[in-house]
Amino acid sequence: MEASSLTQQFFQQLINGISLGSIYALIALGYTMVYGIIRLINFAHGDIYMLGAYAGYFATTFFKMSFFPALIFSMVVASTVGMLIERLAYRPLRGAPKIAILITAIGVSLLLEYGGMILVTPQPRTFPELFSTATYNFMGLVVNSQQIVILVVSLALMFILTYVVNHTKVGKAMRAVSFDTDAARLMGINVDRIISFTFAIGSSLAAAAGILVGIYYNSIDPLMGIMPGLKAFVAAVLGGIGVIPGAMVGGVLLGVIEALVSGFLSSTFRDAAAFIILIVILLFRPAGLFGKNIREKV
């Protein structure tokens, strides 16, 4: 293969990877925010992503909503469910051993998956086409309108999240709770409300990723959150779990690596690449790219 053809293929896969990685980043942000606040790996988070995809599907199919109203509707539904899960499943166990909370998270994940199969049947559903697909050619690189929408929406949501966390009162409270929960409570911060708000934000971002995937791949099913949820967890660990910029970078980096593996090796090894990255990161830099090594008593 000629060098120019290889270069063109590389940049094409890079574009595809950035689109996929921005979706991973949205899901990974939920993992990293919840972990940063209460040190919990919420394994039900990938299923919130699935729930968001179905909320978007029903909003567009039965309520005839266009893309942006359906996106908002999906985010509201998922954030409400996220707060309910935190209130009913996690809050009563906040002082329990971590293994109990971890098992509960797995149980909630299974409940959402198989409850979804009962409610909406296991059959995949075709996601409606919300806008016409246009293809643009830039110097031999092909970009479609779906990829542009995914990138623009993902960047906008990441920017909004960054602004909320760094420049608002509730964001300051979130950072205070993340740093020292007891001190934040003594300073008058309603810790329970901040934790619930964190779950709401993380769940809404996962829902946005779900509806974007539905548009991009044109198919959804009740078990669609398993693999993206695991990969988003890998992305969060890669960037440094608990670090918001790390989740963004980790998600995009993971998407790019997967696209390059698919393009230059084989799509068969795409999923394996994510977990190879996880093993390498845990072996050589357990804190991730942006994390700091902190001793924690288990």
Image: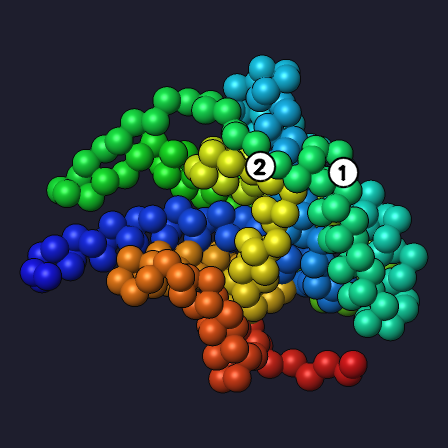
Place of residue 74 in the rendered image (x, y in percent of width and height, measured from the top left): 64, 32
Could you tell me if residue 213 is visible in this image?
yes
Could you tell me if residue 174 is visible in this image?
no
**Residues marked 1 and 2 touching at CB (< 8 Å):** no
Residue farthest to the top, as pictured: 64
Q: In which quarter of the image is the C terminus?
A: bottom right
Tell me the tag on residue 118. 1
**Residue 205 vs residue 193: left or right?**
left
Is 237 or 116 nearer to us in this picture? 116
Which picture quadrant has residue 256?
bottom left
Spatial CA span between label 1 and label 2: 13 Å
**Which residue: 76% across, 38% down?**
118
Determine which residue is flagged by label 2. Answer: 124
Is 172 or 19 nearer to us in this picture? 19
Is 54 or 24 nearer to us in this picture? 54
Q: Earlier in the sequence, mark 1 or mark 2?
A: 1
**Residue 63 vs residue 194: left or right?**
left
Q: Where is 149 relative to 45, above or below?
A: above
Place of residue 223 in the rendered image (x, y in percent of width and height, measured from the top left): 63, 47
- Amino acid carrying mark 1 in the image: Ile
Label 1: state its secondary structure: helix
Tell me the tag on residue 136. none
Q: In which quarter of the image is the N terminus?
A: bottom left
**Which residue: 41% across, 41% down?**
151
Q: Where is 55 relative to 247, above or below?
A: above
Label 2: state its secondary structure: loop
- Amino acid carrying mark 2 in the image: Pro
Place of residue 171 in the rendered image (x, y in percent of width and height, measured from the top left): 67, 50
